[in-house]
Image (cartoon, rainbow, N blue to C red):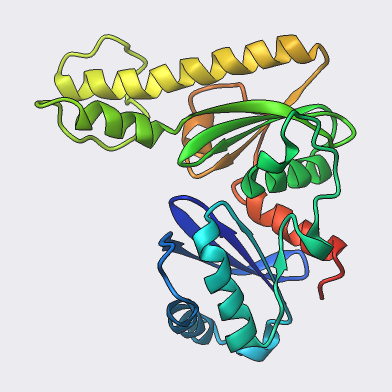
Amino acid sequence: MLLAVDVGNTNVVFALFDGRDVRARWRIATDGRRTGDEYATWLLQLLAIEGIERSEVTSIIFGSVVPRADHNLTVLATKYFGIEPLVAGHGKAAWDFEIDVEQPHTLGADRALNCIAAHELVGGDMIVVDFGTATKFEAVDYNGAYKGGIIAPGINLSLDALVGKTAKLPRIAIAAPETANVIGRNTEDQMLIGVFWGYVAMMEGLIERMKAQIGRPVKVVATGGLAVLFNDKTHIFDVVEADLTIRGLQILAERAGAK
């Protein structure tokens, strides 16, 4: 089985693939100081709970936007599984699509993996939207080439800034407003309306501008934890795939010959 690891700025997601099917999935908070031994202590217990022997893991791939985590994940793979891991974007797992921007080397692994997965799963001209710590909008053409994109503050970052820079505004949870009213009658409702509907308006506006610049029919593919939440309140998404980044890792490992 393949162990795919997606290292984001907020969380690290571990997914165990049996062929192309996800057998198990686990999540841990990102901490660049976490050692390979600490990862192993946590992960091996979870494998045991699922009734999976470590010997059943035959390949490991990780994609990371946190460089400090790379060495520790390599230690996890080599010391505890006896496997030299594939690293997304490097060696046998190098990107196999055109990155048509001014500084190709600056494209984050998560963004590249989303492009790979979206192109294989959906195809055609696409805009890929990933709701993470930052919200990323990627333009991918019908050949799978990355043409550029947009990086915006994630909705939780926006909320953190609003609460952190004001003395009296309370902490609220991100949720879809219960009604379509956009004139709030209390402070909490007004904050939720501003953050939620403001974010929807930002997404809809940016996507319409991207579509106009692309100039061809475009499918919009959304991923990330908040994709489903927003999908219930807007019609801009054609496809919602929560596991897009992890799927990209599986596809890249398969192309690299991992078993």
Q: How many marks?
A: 0
When asked about the image quadrant of residue 251, the answer is bottom right
Instruction: Tell me where residue 173 appears, x and y as whole percent.
Output: 28, 38
Relative to the observer, which residue lies in front, 180 or 248? Answer: 248
| Quadrant of the drawing holding the C terminus | bottom right
Residue 121 against residue 231 in the figure, above or below:
below
| Quadrant of the drawing holding the N terminus | bottom right
Is residue 74 found left or right of 18 in the rendered image? left
Relative to the observer, which residue lies in front, 181 or 75? Answer: 75
Residue 36 against residue 228 in the figure, above or below:
below
Is residue 204 found left or right of 161 in the rendered image? right
Instruction: Tell me where residue 87 appears, x and y as whole percent.
Output: 70, 63
Instruction: Tell me where residue 131 appears, x and y as whole percent.
Output: 52, 38
Residue 52 visible (yes or no): no
Residue 208 against residue 139 in the figure, above or below:
above
Residue at 33%, 25% in the rendered image = 177
Is residue 149 found left or right of 218 in the rendered image? left
Instruction: Tell me where residue 75 appears, x and y as whole percent.
Output: 57, 79
Residue 50 visible (yes or no): yes
Residue at 84%, 37% in the rendered image = 144
Residue at 15%, 26% in the rendered image = 169
Relative to the observer, which residue lies in front, 186 or 257? Answer: 257
Most distant residue in the left direction = 168
When asked about the image quadrant of residue 128, the answer is top right
